[in-house]
Image (cartoon, helix red, strand yellow):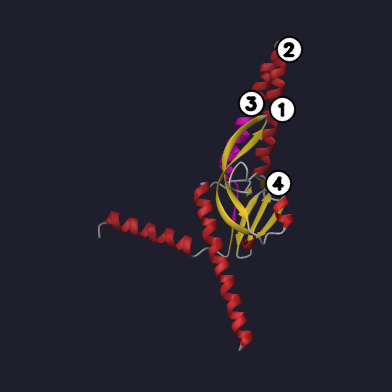
Amino acid sequence: MNAKTHGGAVRLFFFSSVILAPAVSEILYPSKRDWSITALVSLALCGASIWLGSGASPLWNCFSIVLLGGAAIVFLFAAAHLLPNSSFLKISSAGLTVRSFWRTTDYRWVDISEFGVAMIEIERGGIRSRHPRVGFNFSRYAPPLKRATAPERLSTRVGKYEAALPDTYGRDCAELAAYLTLQRAHFLGQTRVRGESTSTANVS
């Protein structure tokens, strides 16, 4: 086996071990790099809007005020994601814990039927754009309150998913959706095995 083939085999083994042997508990945080860049760009736009509005015509003054307001909102939004424990995604044997702007929502694995990639429309500073997110559908076991309090509620008339995670956590959406699907199958399988073992013990 040459060095190139051996290196590929090692990488494949490492990837398989990570996917097939998920951690009991793991926390994903929003990308500090992405939100830092967003905060710096919005701060620069704030400065530019102030410069444009100084000594300009009334029309430019109105434009600069709108730009300043939009950039300030985006800056505050980005800065909030950089604060400790403001947002994260916790993956555990119990399910998912989604924290967004210090608001926490828990989902059992049995509450979710599937994961996938959803395109959602986000409005920041008066500007609308479409972004990919990890979408998911609720199962028949999900309580109505969980459906109503999802961080990102989506319309199934627009897409195929009912809700979405509020961030990508620095990951590719397709890869994260596939990883969560494997985690769900793994932990639900463990739950079934424990339930069958308990039933057998009770019968004995």
N-terminal label among 2 and 3: 3
At a point 68% along the width and 42% down the height, the residue shown is: 80
Quick one: which residue is furthest to the left in this view? 1
Identify the residue under disc 3.
Answer: 45
SS category of the residue bearing label 3: helix
N-terminal label among 1 and 4: 1
At a point 56% along the width and 74% down the height, the residue shown is: 193
Task: Determine whether label 3 and label 1 are within 8 Å by CB.
Answer: no
Identify the residue under disc 1.
Answer: 69
N-terminal label among 4 and 3: 3
Q: Residues within 10 Å of mark 2 (few under 14, many from 20)?
A: few
Quick one: which residue is furthest to the bottom in this view? 204
Amino acid type at circle 3 is Leu
4 vs 3, front mark: 4
State the separation of the CA atoms marked 2 and 3: 19 Å
N-terminal label among 4 and 2: 2
Amino acid type at circle 2 is Pro
Q: Residues within 10 Å of mark 1 (few under 14, many from 20)?
A: some
Magenta residues (range): 27-44
SS category of the residue bearing label 1: helix
Residue 30 among those drawn in magenta? yes
Residue 85 appears in the picture as rendered: no
Mark number, residue 58: 2
